[in-house]
Amino acid sequence: MEKKRFLMLGFFVALVGMGLFTVHAYNSTSKVKKISLFDNETRTINYSRTEKYGQKKFEVYLDDEKGEYIFLNDKLTGFLKNVTIEEEKQEEVKKLMANKTTREGLLKSYNEKAQQVVKKVNDTNSTLNRYDKTNSYYQEGYDEFVYTFTKTIDGYPTNDSITISLDKDGNLSSLNAPRQGLFDKYDNIKINKAEVTNFIEKNMSLDSYSDISNYEVDFEIINLVNDKLVLEIGIELTHKTGAISTTILYYEI
Amino acid sequence: MKKSILFSLFFGIFAFIGFTNPVSARSAYIHYYNQPTDNGIVNREPTYSAALPHLKEMKFNVNGYDNAGAGNAIRQMKNVDGPNVFVVHNHGEPGRQIMGSDGSSLVGQNGETILYQSINRVDPLSFRQLRLAIFYGCQTGVTTGKYGDLPGQVVSKGATTSVAWTVNTYVHSVNEWNRLFFEKAKTDNIVESFRHADYWLEQIQGTTYSNIMKQRTERGNIYAFITL
């Protein structure tokens, strides 16, 4: 009798387990999206995993070629093509790109294509919606043409950028746009440059940095840190020993 | 009887593989400096702790050092049973990786005092067991200064690959980029892992920090795997 009870209990537990597994499997496989990021092509992508960084949860989907599509709060924030970078293949590309005229010609000719991707991702389809091109270069090592478009406020770059990279044939290799529109509501703010300078001087006084012989501003960007709008200021510190290090100041706007 | 012979045979084969497989002999040396300053501690420890689980998955024995000197580092790098992966995170200068709070450093050439270890003076092939050396510090990858080409010198002494930075680096970005790099290096080669780390750092911290980490001097074979 006791044995029968145990058998029944075991059967019941197994049944519940199977049920839970089926539900989990259904949920996993049911997360499918259609995406039309590429010219004349719609791809089906499947949920793969969630990457958690601080408060942010990035959902990663994969296409048939293991390309990663990243979603934050259900909005596409990125794409990274799965590529194999092999020495033999790269030698040919290196030879081609060693020619400065070829390299710079391709960088220029793909500019329009990069802008098209920005318009598509940004849901405007016609304008760059205030994303100004701030940088374009050829990334050696993994051979990509990189284009960065950034929103600025009162002349300062924000941490809202869209970066596009294209391979040597002009195919989309990656897209990075994780903070679209994050600073739009602060569009009309003005930053008092004299106050910023005073803030830096006060914070970098020798009382705070006794072993520093010199400092210089490395970069300034508008950012949100702990839900506060700040000017994030990267500072290069030169130590009395000749060593160089860095620190970051946050000027609350 | 037959069963026990078969069992002994299989056990013997597994034991043989276990003892001879080079996987078990992998080791990594990660140096960081948790620096006390007038404004608090500069926390570089995650360069070690966040990479640790990934390196362990790759079967590396990982030794972490806080504020050790350059002498200790160079002794281990020259040892034939020394580290296959070598990582330092501290201050820098063109061609110079500072190690400890005593100012001891690794430099490509022209080390002025006993505290400076000039890599160009090391015997040829001394670093042949080293698959990857990473120098996280401001401008360590600038090759035109008096201390020369630090990552280039390391490769010239037998290391497979070496990387250093040509611009100023920021502690929180280095810690995150390093973790992302080793996360990918479990399955992909060095340059593919660079690409993964560059990309994901931009998702997490933004374009400014990702662009900083992309400014590298890469020497040797960037297509190698650190696990081979």
Image (cartoon, coloured by chain):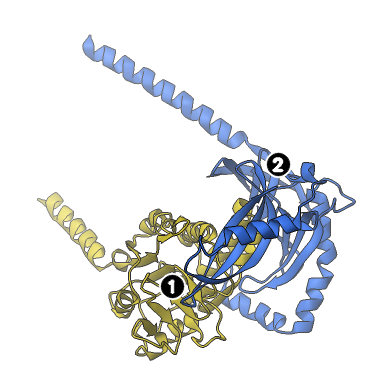
Chain colours: A blue, B yellow
Q: Residue B42 falls in which quadrant of the image? A: bottom left
Q: Which chain does tag 1 point to?
A: B
Q: Residue at x 57, y 44 (%)?
A: A48
Label 2 resides on the chain identified as: A
Residue A129 as seen in the image, left or right of residue B184: right
Please, what is the three-letter code of the amino acid marked with disc 1?
A: Leu
| Residue beneath disc 2 | A75
- Please tell me the numbered disc located at residue B132: 1
Which residue does the image show at 38% across and 66% down from the upper left? Answer: B31
Residue pictured at 78% horizontal, 80% vertical: A102
Q: CA distance from mark 2 to mark 1?
A: 38 Å
Secondary structure at numbered mark 2: strand
Which quarter of the figure has residue A186?
top right
Give x and y (percent) for residue B90: 45, 68
Direction from residue B201 to residue B181 in the image, left or right: left
Which three-letter amino acid code belongs to the residue tagged 2? Lys
Q: Secondary structure at mark 1?
A: strand
Q: Residues within 10 Å of mark 1 (few under 14, many from 20)?
A: many
Residue B186 located left or right of residue A69: left
Near-viewer residue (A171 or A101): A101
Q: Is residue A100 visible?
A: yes
- Residue A238: percent from left, percent from top: 54, 72
